Amino acid sequence: MSQNKDYKVSRSDAPLGQTPSGKQKAQGPSRQSVWKMFDRIAHRYDLLNHLLSLNRDKFWRKKVASYLPNGDKLAILDLATGTGDQLIALADSGRVERGLGLDLSEKMLDFGRTKIDRLKLGDRLTLNIGDAESIPCKDESFDAVTISFGIRNVNDVLNALSEMRRVLKPGGRALILEFSLPSSRVMRSLHLFYLRHLLPHLGRMISGDDQAYRYLNQTIETFPYGVSFCSLMTQVGFVEASFIPLTFGVVSIYIGEA
Ligand SMILES: C[S@@+](CC[C@H](N)C(=O)[O-])C[C@H]1O[C@@H](n2cnc3c(N)ncnc32)[C@H](O)[C@@H]1O
């Protein structure tokens, strides 16, 4: 992982209280209405993901899978799994023996279950209702815990990160895929224009939901990213956290070593 050397934070580097609060969140729907919102747009969710990211989401998810820890019989947990695309990409690595996906939206999970059945992955992958902030699993039960485009949606980010840390086996790894902002000023301006002026309209037209894609740009712009986000990870006990910006930095993968 030489490319992420510059972006590493160790537990001892993280000054408590000097990093953005884990509770920092854009003004938006409450947690209950967040998953209800996903229930409403579930039927269009995959299509919107592919269209609005110009199909880059498939590459990002594959990239997350490339950072799974060593081993070929991994037990993995995917939080806020939605329609299961990240969990399926992890299983495609051929190194996952058992994968559990948890989400609060039953409708998103229903679409995911249909995909898992179609791909004949039902013997390895299971989708259940479950909260990322109160994971219904024993301590130290997984080799890897992932959350893609989900950590932004939880009420208390530190709480969710600390839950991820709790269920990881010693030496396990957390992988978090989340939106971020490009560091180049030009790319950042272009991206902000897209987020503020194009994405809400496209999202509304395709999903038929007025709120969902307005909320998305607010949460992306206010959510901690890069080194700030790594500091949140080390605050909850990850020994080391690093990040890899992808596609000009519009998303980043965060890697936390348990
Ligand atoms: C943007 S979607 C991401 C879905 C999927 N991980 C993906 O990569 O496409 C966010 C998901 O987070 C779920 N969610 C929100 N808060 C949650 C929580 N506290 N626990 C579990 N899932 C949650 C929503 O229901 C929704 O399915």
Image (spheres, rainbow, N blue to C red):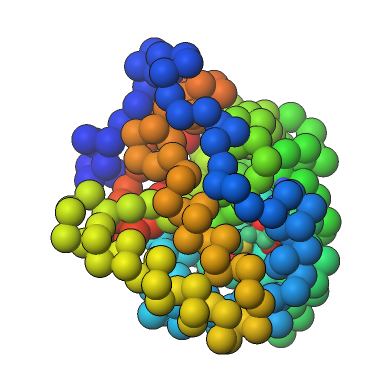
Q: Quadrant of ligand 1?
A: bottom right
The image quarter in which residue 35 lies: bottom right
> Is residue 161 at least partly visible in the picture?
no
Q: Residue 80: horizontal and vertical position, in percent?
A: 67, 55
Q: Residue 31: horizontal and vertical position, in percent?
A: 74, 49
Instruction: Specify whether 11 is left or right of 250.
Output: right
Please give the count of numbered marks on the rendered protein.
0
Q: Residue at x 42, y 51 (%)?
A: 221
The image quarter in which residue 137 lies: top right
Instruction: Specify whether 148 is left or right of 67.
Output: right
Q: Residue 51: horizontal and vertical position, in percent?
A: 46, 82
Q: Residue 76: horizontal and vertical position, in percent?
A: 64, 50
Q: Residue at x 46, y 54 (%)?
A: 220
Q: Nearer the viewer, residue 46 or 240?
A: 46
Q: Is residue 60 above or below residue 230?
A: below
Q: Residue at x 71, y 67 (%)?
A: 38
